[in-house]
Image: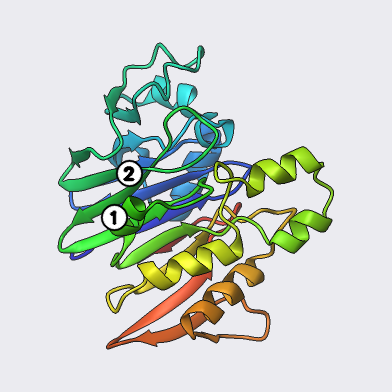
Amino acid sequence: MSRLHLHILGSGSKGNCALVEGPQGLIMIDNGLSRRETLKRMAELGLSADDVAALVITHEHGDHIKGLDVWCKHWHGPLFASRDTLSCKENLAHLPVEEFDPGDTLPIVGIQVQTYSTSHDVINPVGYRFNALDDSIGFATDTGELSSKAIGILKDCRVLALESNHDVTMLREGPYPRFLQERILSTKGHLSNNQAADAARELVTDRTEQLIAMHISQDNNRPSLTVKSYANALDASLDDELGSSATCLQGPRKLSIRPASQYQPTTIQ
């Protein structure tokens, strides 16, 4: 293996799970799908549960951890979570977990995993950057804003998985009650398409080859809107009229922009 791979099993409010593949195995990010569905989607990508060497958690909302207890009954690798993230959940407090503080760097199966604080309405939310093989993957979801420290950690990754949760107009005109709209729009909510696009201007460099729109709301967004928002920010050209993906040249390299799916697993090389 000459570079890291990102496998996204599902991204959105119905369940989140992804895996970073390195030279010594897979690191799972969150476990918000049933064990059966996780194994099914892994098999579609040619992955095996036997190769999952570790599991890291971003935060304790159900769509990120609802499959964790059952998964850990069949799997016995190291589980990592920021301090108090799992102990605050009564049904998960029994799990053996290696706790860390945001800002720590974790050496996990040959990958240096940098951690940083995100901004969400939970105990101690975090995001990650994975470094190995002179390669890097940045991962940022479920945050209402990105701090300057988060920007510094996520900048210049070859693969960037960045939340682009909602279109503000769709959210405001949609069916969500006002209190929920305000939660989503707050600094402890989720990044909008415009916020994500503004961040992408700072984060994407000549090294960045893949930009993936993550955690897209089914009610308040469309995948094509996320792609178009990123494309406008980065002077990229849409690959088709639907806006299913976009491409631009960043220096000597080509940057591909595409959305992650809630239901269709995909591998980012």
Residue 4 visible here = no
Give residue 254's position: percent from left, percent from top: 36, 83
The residue carrying mark 1 is 153
Q: Is 246 on the left-hand or right-hand side of 109?
A: right
Q: Quadrant of residue 161?
A: bottom left
Give residue 82's position: percent from left, percent from top: 34, 30
Q: Are marks 1 and 2 in contact (CB under 8 Å)?
A: yes
Q: Is 110 on the left-hand or right-hand side of 182?
A: left
Residue 17 visible here = yes
- Mark 1: secondary structure: helix
Q: Which of 157 and 64 lies nearest the eye of the viewer? A: 157
Residue 196 drawn above or below residue 65: below
Tag 2: amino acid: Tyr
Q: Disc 1 versus disc 2: distance between alpha carbons?
A: 8 Å
Q: Which of 176 and 73 lies nearest the eye of the viewer? A: 176
Considering the image in quadrants, where does the C terminus appear? bottom left
Q: Quadrant of residue 178?
A: top right
- Mark 2: secondary structure: strand
What residue is drawn where x is 33% and y is 47%?
128
Give residue 4's position: percent from left, percent from top: 26, 59
Q: Quadrant of residue 127?
A: top left
Residue 168 drawn above or below residue 122: below
Tag 1: amino acid: Ile
Give the label on residue 144, or none.
none
Give the class, few, some or many, for how many residues have Cα within 10 Å of label 2's Cα (few <14, many ≥20): many
The residue carrying mark 2 is 116
Give the class, few, some or many, for how many residues have Cα within 10 Å of label 1's Cα (few <14, many ≥20): some
